[in-house]
Image (cartoon, helix red, strand yellow):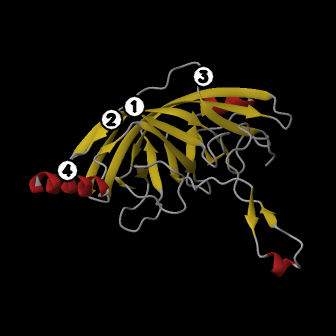
Amino acid sequence: MRARVFAVALIAVLCSLPMIAQDIPKGPDVWDSLGGGSTDVTLSGNDWKLLCGVTVGDTAVQLKGFNIAGLGTGDTQVDRLQDASLPSIGSSATVDIQLTALSLVNDGTHPCSPLTLRVKPDPSVTQGLGTMTITKTSAAGGTFSATVLVDALIEAVDSSGTVKGLTTVTGTLGDTSPSPWSYAAPTSAAAASPWYPGVDPATKKPVRVCRIGKKILPARHCYQPRPKCKSIRPVPVDTAAHGGTADAVIIAVEPCSIDADPAPTTN
């Protein structure tokens, strides 16, 4: 009887202990693309002619992310299509990945200025499958590397939103080096438990991740984990400090979703 009671108590204690996740479930990874020269693509002379009729040589255009409705500040989504089993430190798993959302606009002038260049997945094709290899290097997380296939549609739009020209580009983006991931989220990250790519497992801070295009003309895409999305919400305050006239104040914070289509801009 005493042994049975001990066994039941032991089971209860074990069940109450926190579990360290061993598997990374399949799901989406949402990113904020970085502008300011961190994201660019070189378009051929033929691409520029299709976009706006200009005659130029191969020319790079700087890009930046434009938020996608429902993804907070996110502008890029890549889905992991299988679970990754990581039973022990040092184990690795390779899963298929697929680009499912992309929203970029030009970041500065370009040969088709003042038209705005808008980049999104090519709707006429199914995005190809790339791979991601996830390695567990500690109980806190590890590293990952990925190769993403991209079929993109680039549109040149005027100030009224009318598409004046378009072209398609195809390429493969590969990591410049393995990037960190963490089981634990930084306070600034959007929830994606139990997997936080682009987060240093030791410092719990987001890091910049870059992929370089593997095609005839170069491309580069740098991004970071999106911050936690918030809503405009009431925040209680000390009414005495406000003359006793207010029960709460409304503060504006980062929206959880915004318009999906970028408004055309002039450069």
- Labels 1 and 2: the sequence-earlier one: 1
Q: In this view, does 60 lie above or below 98?
A: below
- Labels 2 and 4: the sequence-earlier one: 4
**Nearer the viewer's eye, disc 3 or disc 4?**
4
Q: Mark 3 points at which residue?
A: 123
- Residue 81: numbered disc: 1
Q: In this view, does 241 lie above or below 116?
A: below
Q: Name the residue under label 4.
A: 88
Q: Distance between the residues labelled 3 and 4?
A: 40 Å
- Circles 1 and 2: CB atoms closer than 8 Å: yes
- Residue 167: numbered disc: none
User: Residue 103 placed where, x, y %?
Assistant: 63, 39
- SS assignment at label 3: loop
- Circles 1 and 3: CB atoms closer than 8 Å: no
Q: Which residue is at a point 43% across and 52% down the rendered structure image? A: 196
User: Residue 36 placed where, x, y %?
Assistant: 62, 57
Q: Which residue is at a point 27% across and 49% down the rendered structure image? A: 135
Task: Locate residue 151 relative to residue 141 in the image: left or right.
Answer: right
- SS assignment at label 4: loop
Q: What residue type is labelled 4?
A: Ser
**Nearer the viewer's eye, disc 3 or disc 2?**
2
**Nearer the viewer's eye, disc 2 or disc 4?**
4
For mark 3, does the 10 Å Cα neighbourhood hold few (<14), some (14 to 19), or many (20 or more) residues? Answer: few
Q: What residue type is labelled 3?
A: Pro
- Circles 3 and 2: CB atoms closer than 8 Å: no
Q: Which residue is at a point 77% across and 43% down the rendered structure image? A: 113
Q: What residue type is labelled 1?
A: Leu
User: Residue 198 placed where, x, y %?
Assistant: 44, 54
**Nearer the viewer's eye, disc 4 or disc 1?**
4
Q: Distance between the residues labelled 3 and 2?
A: 24 Å
